[in-house]
Image (spheres, rainbow, N blue to C red):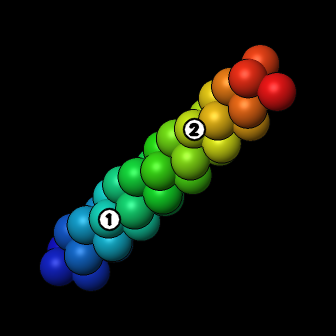
Amino acid sequence: MFAGERVKVDSSDVHSFYSHGSTVTSGRLIRFCIGSSLKNIHH
């Protein structure tokens, strides 16, 4: 019973961790793409 609850918490923590990491990574990629496109427009 306790083991099952612990697994649920661990899985949720891992899911939130990965979702947060993917969000940060995608945000950086978007910023990088916008920055490179702006540089191309200016040049």
Q: Which quadrant: the N terminus?
A: bottom left
**Identity of the amino acid at label 2?**
Arg
Place residue 4 in its image quadrant: bottom left
Left or right, residue 28 beside residue 40: left
Task: In the rendered view, tell whether residue 41 sits above or below residue 2.
Answer: above
**Mark 2 vs 1, N-terminal side:** 1
**Identity of the amino acid at label 1?**
Asp
Q: What secondary structure is found at the residue carrying circle 1?
A: helix
Label placed on residue 13 = 1
Q: What secondary structure is found at the residue carrying circle 2?
A: helix
Task: In the rendered view, tell whether residue 27 sits above or below residue 13.
Answer: above
Give whichever of 21, 28 is nearer the camera.
28
Q: Name the mark nearer the viewer: 2 or 1.
A: 2
Task: In the rendered view, tell whether residue 22 sits above or below residue 18.
Answer: above
Q: Dot 1 surroundings within 10 Å: few (below 14), some, or many (20 or more)?
A: few
Q: CA distance from mark 2 to mark 1?
A: 27 Å
Q: Quick check: can you spot residue 4?
A: no
State the image coordinates of residue 24 (x, y, percent, origin top left): 47, 50
Q: Residue reaching furthest bottom?
A: 3
Give whichever of 1, 14 is nearer the camera.
14
Q: Quick check: can you spot residue 38?
A: yes
Q: Which residue is under mark 2?
A: 31
State the image coordinates of residue 43 (x, y, percent, origin top left): 82, 27
